[in-house]
Amino acid sequence: MPARLDRLPWSRFHWLVVIALGITWILDGLEVTIAGSVAGALRESPVLRFSASDVGFANSAYLVGAVGGALFFGWLTDRWGRKKLFFLTLGLYLIATAGTAFTWDLPSFALMRFLTGAGIGGEYSAINSAIQELIPARRRGWTDLVINGSFWIGAALASGASILLLDPRVIDPEIGWRLAFFGGAVIGVFILLLRRFVPESPRWLATHHRAEEAERVIEGIEARVRAEGHVLPDLPPVDTRVTPRHATSMQEVFTALFRTYPKRTFYCLVLMAAQAFFYNAIFFTYAMMLTDFYDVPSRDVGYYILPFAAGNVLGPLLLGRLFDTWGRRPMIILTYGMSGVLLAATGFAFAGGHLTATTQTLCWSVTFFFASAAASAAYLTAAENFPLEMRALAIAIFYALGTLLGAVAPWVFGLLIESGSREQVLIGYLFGAGLMLLAALVTVFYGVAAERKPLEEVARPLSWD
C-alpha cells in the first residue's frame, strides 16, 4: 500500500488533499494575524481597554490552548483515525473563533482564544499526519513546506481585512475587530463541506484491522488518477507482514521516543522550540512594535503585514523543492542559520535607531523568507521521523513542547515593548536569534536525510513483523 501511494503521479486528488487539509494553516494565519492586527483596537476598545501585557496574555492563552489541543487530539488521532479528527477539531475552532467576537472582558476573551488554539492545535496533529501519508515521497518535502507556508496566505487575508475593518471611516473599530474574528468561522464552514471528499489514510486503516477498507480507498484513488489519463507503473512484490492493532500504548510511544530514536527526539524538540519562540516573539507583538516605536496608527498596521506575509509565503514556495533535491539537512542548516543572523542584524539596527517602520518591515520580510521555510521544515521533520502508529501523537508532542516553550514569548516581548527601551527589545531579539543558530548547529550532528524516501524507510512502522 505505501508503494502504491508513492508511485502515484500528481493529480487532482492530491490538489484536493492540499486544499481541504492545508486550509488549517490559512486559518491559523488568519487567527494569529487578526490577534496581532487588532491589538491596537483591543487596547483602544471602550469595552475591553486592554494593556499591551493583556494582549500578550490573551495571545499566550491561544498558544497554551494549542498545546493542550495538540496533545489531546493527537492522542485521539492515532486511535480514532485522521478523518474523524478533521471534523472534530475544525468544529471546535468554528465555535470558539465565532465566540471570540462576542467576548466582553479579558477572562472571556482569553477563554475563547484558548479554545480556538485548542482546535487549531488538534488540526496540526490530524492534518500533518494525513498529508504525510497521502502525498508521494518524492513530493513530500515541498508539499509539506508549501502547505505550512500557506499560514501566511491567511495572514495576508487577515491584514487586508483589518485595513477595512479597523478604519473608523468605514466601520466602528469596536465592531470591526469582532467581525474580523467571526470571519474565520465563515471560512471554516466551507472547509467542513470540502473535507467530506478526503478519504481516511490507507496506511492508518491497514494497521487498525481495516485492510479491506484501505484497499477500497487506494483502488478509488488509483481509479481517479487513471481517469485523468495517467498510466501507473507496475510494482515489484513486497514481502511485509503487518500485525494490526486497535491502539498503540504509551509505553511503546515513549520507548520509540527515548530508546529507539532518542537523537531524533532531541533534534525535533530543538527545531520546534527554536522556531516557536522566534515566530511568537516577533509576530504576536508585530502591531505593538509598529504602534509604540514608529507611531503607526492601529488601522494602518495591515499595510505593513502584507509585505511581511509575502516574504513568508515565498520562502517555502521557492526554497521548498530544494528540501527534496538538495536534501533536508543542508536546507535546514541554511534556513535556520540565515534566520538567526538576519534577526540579530535587524535587532542591532533597530536598537541603533537606524530603521523606519518601512525599513523595519522590509528587514523582517527578508528574515522571515528564510524563517518561514525553517519553521515549516520543523513540522516536516517531526512528522516523517517517527513510526506510522504514533505519528500524530509525535507531531503533537513536539508541537506542544515547542509551542509551550515559545508561549511565554508574546507576554515577555509585550513587557519589553511596554518598557519603551529599544535595548530591552534587542535582548529579546538576540535570544530568539541564538535559538535559531543553535538549531542549525544541532542539525549538523543530528539531521536526518529523509528526502525522497518512503515514510516506512525513514521510520519502520511498529506493526511490521
Image: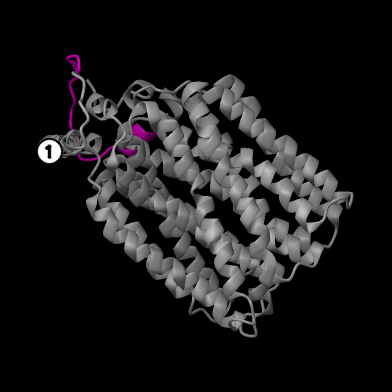
- Give the extent of the magenta segment: 235-255
Total labels: the figure holds: 1
Q: Where does residue 290 sit, x and y in percent of width and height?
A: 74, 62
Q: Residue 139 or 205: which is nearer the viewer?
A: 139
At a point 36% along the width and 59% down the height, the residue shown is 90
Q: Residue 273 or 261: which is nearer the viewer?
A: 273
Is 70 magenta? The answer is no
- Asked if 97 appears above or below 173 in the picture, the reply is above
At a point 51% along the width and 66% down the height, the residue shown is 113
At a point 33% along the width and 65% down the height, the residue shown is 189
296 to the left or right of 88:
right
- In the displayed image of the protein, which residue is found farthest to the front? 229
At a point 74% along the width and 35% down the height, the residue shown is 341
Q: Is residue 285 visible?
A: no
Q: Is residue 90 visible?
A: yes
- Residue 185: quadrant of the picture: bottom left
Quadrant holding the C terminus = top left
* Residue type at tag 1: Arg
| Residue at the spot of label 1 | 216
- Asked if 241 appears above or below 347 in the picture, the reply is above
- Asked if 197 appears above or below 46 in the picture, the reply is above
Main secondary-structure element of the magenta-colored stretch? loop
- Asked if 111 appears above or below 76 in the picture, the reply is below
Are there few (<14), some (14-19), or many (20+) residues within 10 Å of tag 1?
A: few
Numbered disc 1: secondary structure: helix
Q: Where does residue 462 sit, x and y in percent of width and height?
A: 29, 27
Q: Where does residue 169 sit, x and y in percent of width and height?
A: 64, 82
450 to the left or right of 309:
left
- In the displayed image of the protein, which residue is found farthest to the left? 212
Is 245 magenta? The answer is yes
Q: Residue 214 or 67: which is nearer the viewer?
A: 214
242 to the left or right of 138:
left
